[in-house]
Image (cartoon, helix red, strand yellow):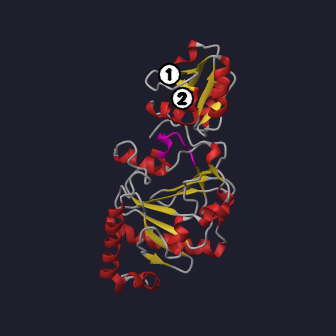
């Protein structure tokens, strides 16, 4: 996982620096400051962001933070020499940081804010309408939810619980639908634990209201991810630089206004990061799990590694279990799965 919580120093011609800052200020993992102090640095780091300052009065006491110095010039970027050219700051700034394993975050100008545009192009809504680009397996269906294998399944048993209605997050569900979701969640835990002999890590990358704060290529139709794993959830989340708060599951509806990350560990402890000033990377829980598994950089990314063949494997294992154990299952699970086997 690319890191945050670094100090980045811009040097060069004053006019060039100001032009670069006009673009850089839009990157979500960057906070631009006018001066350096321990308090300023710690406050930025607390929100899981990088500090960026232009031409500071450099103080050797900050060398312990291992600052990165980028030289801003007119013309083209030279990534190897850490030179940022003004010809293409939007594309080149994150490339330089990526070469140093630093996360720049998405750029706010690319945020999704038009809920109608998002809904009309929603992949999950197309699945509901039977018009997806690829045929999808449905594993389980209740009145208001379906369960699908997850795209980009770099681990065994990856499934998603999806509301049939187009809502931005599970925090927006009305009470009756939320109660139904909890039942579906329990059913999926039971089935996945029986198949994979591991307890389940559950997570959601919740979109803010109307999809605000999400990149346009994000799927903002709510979906909960489930992963059979022995990963120590809270320990690994903390290691990534994020410190979520413990919440009561009944209080999730308080977090629908802004994007959030929800993490539910194998003992059903619910943790959330819902501070709009805190940066969390895209696909953050997937990145944490991939790091725990020791995977190569980028293997977590379902866009570049869709692993569609793994969806078939997950579905067949699920169907095989249901067929074998059908008569021993609770009647509501029978009713939710029988037409798919």
Q: What residue is drawn where x is 53% and y is 45%? A: 281
Q: Is residue 4 visible?
A: no
**Percent x, y of residue 114:** 68, 58
Query: Could you say whether the residue bearing mark 1 is in a helix, strand or loop?
Result: loop
Question: Any magenta on residue 16?
Answer: no
What crowding class fits label 1: few (fewer than 14 Cα within 10 Å), some (14-19), or many (20 or more)? few
| Real-space CA distance between mark 2 and mark 1, rounded to the nearest whole angstrom | 8 Å
Give the prevailing secondary structure in the magenta stretch: loop
Name the residue tied to disc 2. 6
What crowding class fits label 2: few (fewer than 14 Cα within 10 Å), some (14-19), or many (20 or more)? many
**Magenta-drawn segment:** 237-244
**Residue 42 in the image: above or below residue 59:** below
**Would you identify the image quadrant in which residue 118 lies?**
bottom right
Which residue occupies the foreground of this view, 150 or 14? Answer: 14
- The mark that comes first in sequence, 2 or 1, is 2
Q: Is residue 202 visible?
A: yes
Name the residue tied to disc 1. 66
**Residue 254 in the image: above or below residue 90:** below
Q: What residue is drawn where x is 43% and y is 50%? A: 301
Whether residues under marks 2 and 1 lie with C-beta atoms below 8 angstroms apart, the answer is yes
> In this rendering, would 135 be left or right of 20?
left
Quadrant into which the N terminus falls:
top left
């Amino acid at each position: 996982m690319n890191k945050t919580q670094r100090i980045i120093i811009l040097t060069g011609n004053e006019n060039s620096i100001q032009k670069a800052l006009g673009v850089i200020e839009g990157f979500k993992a960057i906070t631009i400051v006018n001066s350096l102090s321990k308090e300023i640095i710690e406050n930025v780091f607390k929100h899981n962001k990088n500090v960026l300052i232009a031409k500071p009065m450099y103080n050797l006491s900050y060398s312990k933070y291992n600052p990165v110095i980028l030289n801003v010039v007119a013309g083209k970027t030279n990534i190897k020499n850490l030179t940022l050219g003004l010809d293409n700051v939007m594309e080149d700034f994150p490339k330089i940081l990526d070469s140093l394993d630093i996360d720049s975050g998405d750029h706010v100008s690319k945020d999704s804010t038009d809920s109608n545009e998002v809904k009309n192009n929603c992949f999950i809504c197309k699945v509901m309408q039977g018009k997806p680009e690829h045929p999808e397996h449905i594993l389980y269906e209740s009145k208001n939810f379906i369960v699908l294998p997850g795209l980009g399944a770099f681990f065994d048993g990856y499934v998603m619980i999806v509301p049939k209605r187009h809502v931005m997050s599970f925090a927006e569900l009305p009470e009756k639908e939320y109660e139904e979701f909890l039942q579906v969640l329990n059913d999926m835990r039971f089935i996945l634990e029986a198949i994979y002999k591991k307890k389940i890590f559950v997570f959601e990358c919740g979109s803010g209201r109307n999809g605000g704060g999400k990149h346009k290529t994000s799927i903002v139709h709510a979906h909960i991810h489930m992963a059979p794993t022995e990963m120590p959830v809270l320990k690994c989340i903390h290691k990534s630089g994020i410190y979520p708060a413990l919440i009561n599951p009944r209080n999730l509806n308080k977090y629908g206004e802004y994007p959030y990350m929800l993490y539910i560990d194998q003992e059903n402890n619910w943790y959330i990061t819902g501070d709009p000033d805190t940066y969390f990377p895209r696909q953050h829980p997937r990145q944490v799990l991939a790091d725990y598994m020791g995977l190569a950089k980028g293997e977590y990314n379902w866009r570049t590694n869709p692993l569609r063949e793994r969806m078939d494997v997950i579905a067949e294992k699920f169907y095989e279990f249901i067929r074998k154990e059908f008569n021993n299952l609770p009647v509501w699970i029978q009713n939710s799965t029988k037409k798919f086997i």
